[in-house]
Amino acid sequence: MSRRRSSLIGRILFWVLVVGILVYLMFPFYWAFISALKTQSELIRTPATLWPDSPTFVNFRSVFSNDRFLRALLNSTIVATSVTALSLVVGSFAGYALGKMRFRGKTPSLYVILAMTMFPQIAVLAGLYAVIRVLGLPPMPSMILSYMIFTLPFTVWVLTSFFRGLPVSLLQAAQVDGATMMQSFRLVLLPLTAPALVTTGLLAFIQAWNEYLFALTFTVINEKARTVPVAIALFTGQVSFQEPFGEIMAAAVVVTIPLVALVLIFQQRIVAGLTAGAVKG
């Protein structure tokens, strides 16, 4: 009887902990959504309400009628898509070489790639900005190349582990049939890496989509090249000295929806990519 009671208490405590963590993680998104449905007068009311008295979509209409925000949304789509595509192309070749080929210096190369993820953005920003100015690159290509400093090492590391876990017999069978190394990579091994490609591609897209520091620095004198994080941070109200909290929250909801949709669509492949190689068999 005591064992059954202790098991029941443990189960109740477990679910209380799960619900508490869920509320803690989801409350910021809930607060952003309901704030986007409130009027300006209700947003500054104290005490704050957990649900708007008269929900309205005026903030969403203001966001979608804002040409600067729409341009920033297009810029973010171009930059994030380009970063993802380049990271996957370069990362797949590097992962194939580091995972399946033998050459001198392979292990030190992996450690150097891993070490690149340890540097904070602010530590490389000044030198990177100086290089960009010397080369005279426009803001959007500058952001694309800069973001790859952080997306490419992770992509290479994950794809290397995935390629390393693929059976060597597949590569040997392809070579016996007369396939070259490039044909073996493109026709045999690459299709098997779809879960890892989806996982790394989505994480690279999210990181490029949400990046703020580099985007703010490279677009400080070019307003038309700003991405959505910068555009949201620099939102101005229709009245002087007014902070448009409602529009900012509506814009945050709008830019979050594509990321949530991508995660929901590819969730099975994401789990398969993250757990690939975790169990030998």
Image (tube, rainbow, N blue to C red):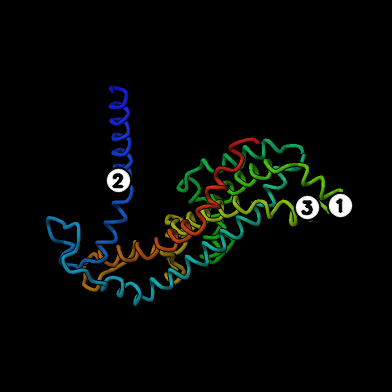
Label 3 neighbour load within 10 Å: few <14, some 14-19, many 20+? some
Residue holding disc 2: 24
Circle 3 SS class:
helix
Tell me the CA gap for discs 2 and 3.
48 Å
Question: Which of the 4 image quarters holds residue 212?
Answer: bottom left
Q: Are marks 3 and 1 in contact (CB under 8 Å)?
A: no
- Viewer-proximal residue, 10 or 267? 10
- Viewer-proximal residue, 54 or 134? 54
Residue holding disc 3: 184
Label 1 neighbour load within 10 Å: few <14, some 14-19, many 20+? few
Residue 240 x %, y %? 21, 70
- Viewer-proximal residue, 272 or 104? 272
**Residue occupying the point 87% across, 48% down:** 176
Q: Is residue 74 visible?
A: yes
Q: Are marks 2 and 3 in contact (CB under 8 Å)?
A: no
Q: Point out the image quarter for the C terminus.
A: top right
Residue holding disc 1: 177
